[in-house]
Image (spheres, helix red, strand yellow):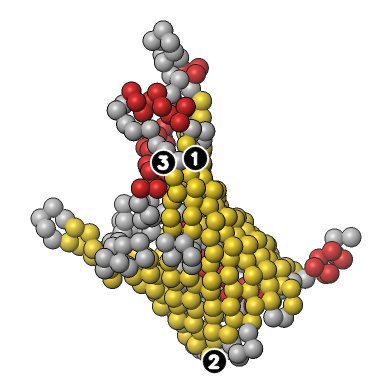
Amino acid sequence: MKLTTKILIFILFASNSLFAQVAPKYSNEFLAIGVGARGLGMGGSVVASVDDINAVYWNPAGLYKLDKKIEIGAMHSEYFAGIAKYDFLGASYKIDDKSAAGISMIRFGVDDIPNTLDLIDSDGNIRYDRISSFSVADYAFLFTYSRVLPVDGLSIGGNVKLIRRNAGDFADAWGFGFDVAAQYQLKNWKFGANLRDATSTFNAWQFNQELLRDVFEATGNEVPENGLELTLPRLLLGAGYMYNISDKFSLYSELGLQTTTDGKRNTLIKTDVVSIDPSLGLEFGYKNMVYARAGVNNFQQIPDYDNTSTFSWQPNIGVGLNLYGFRLDYALTDIGNQSIALYSHIFSLSYRFNSAGFFASSK
């Protein structure tokens, strides 16, 4: 069953990879999942408040708020009962009180997929020893810069993105794009905006036609040609309010809006040009050390066979611990039967330190 599932997932990946240049919708969609258990536990509603290594993804303008010189962070999660792996690794450096830089990598892939193209030899015999394996994986490398502006409470940031996508020896692509972002804080209010793929991101695909030609022609399919895939801009907006219940307890709430520009999607608000997916996140904190989180997002209308529709939404919960420079976060997403996918356990860990103190302690 697991082998069959891997083959089915490969077909889905290959369909997206080999023919993505035909239409731009859902291009580079692995970059829409999110990083960091805090953000995922709050349904993605962190664009206005993110201030750690995960800012390289959610809002680069928040990276300068690092409270230490260096922060290193990582996340691991699995989808489809562990068949698909999703990972994040990043590091940031606070240049001075007004600016910071970071570098990070995101990978989403399915490994150990059986390659049965050579299963039958020239004599018509089935040769299991000729089965090999390959991976279908998407990579993104983000180079981030953040800086505070002379306007009190306002900061800006951006990413330079390098995209690498491959489907074994069958096809691969390189892509390049930019993100621009801003954050603004006014007393207890926080606002954020992140325009991803601001000038559109371009993926140039190359296909191993010699490897694919025989199979495609034997099955009556057209051999794919090299092409260009376009990722249209996506705008993330957030507005939040921090309520200090007492000296020890706090409650933060944030409303998020994610706007895509590649046509109509199954979101709560949609037109033929843009689609808007709202989200809401809550974070209850104790002494800035222990956190409990919840969020809702992915609101959809699901059509039924009797021409009616049902309302669907995705709940998320999470917890966090911030102690001695370590941040350990956990999120449980896609809970229960709210969608067809299984729920996923997300863990992320980061460590913040001042470089001088770190190297001195390591002697």
Q: How far apart are the two marked residues, 1 and 2, measured between alpha carbons? A: 51 Å
Mark closest to the chain's N terminus, 1 or 3: 3
* Residue at disc 1, secondary structure: strand
For the C terminus, which image quadrant? bottom right
Residue at image point 58% right, 85% down: 154
Tell me: 171 left or right of 335. right
Q: Amino acid at mark 3?
A: Leu
Q: Amino acid at mark 2?
A: Lys
Q: Which mark is residue 187?
A: 2
Disc 3 designates what residue?
18
State which quadrant residue 147 falls in: bottom right
Residue at image point 43% right, 65% down: 233
For residue 361, above or below residue 257:
above
Residue at image point 40% right, 48% down: 21
Q: Nearer the viewer, residue 239 or 344?
A: 239
Q: Nearer the viewer, residue 218 or 15?
A: 218
For residue 314, above or below residue 213:
below
Q: Which mark is residue 206?
A: 1
* Residue at disc 2, secondary structure: loop
For the N terminus, which image quadrant? top left
For residue 116, above or below residue 310:
above
| Picture coordinates of residue 28, whole percent (x, y) | 45, 54
Q: Nearer the viewer, residue 350 or 150?
A: 150
Mark 3 Cα-neighbour bin, 10 Å: few <14, some 14–19, many ≥20: many
Tell me: 50 left or right of 7. right
Q: How far apart are the two marked residues, 2 and 3, measured between alpha carbons? A: 50 Å
Q: Amino acid at mark 1?
A: Gln
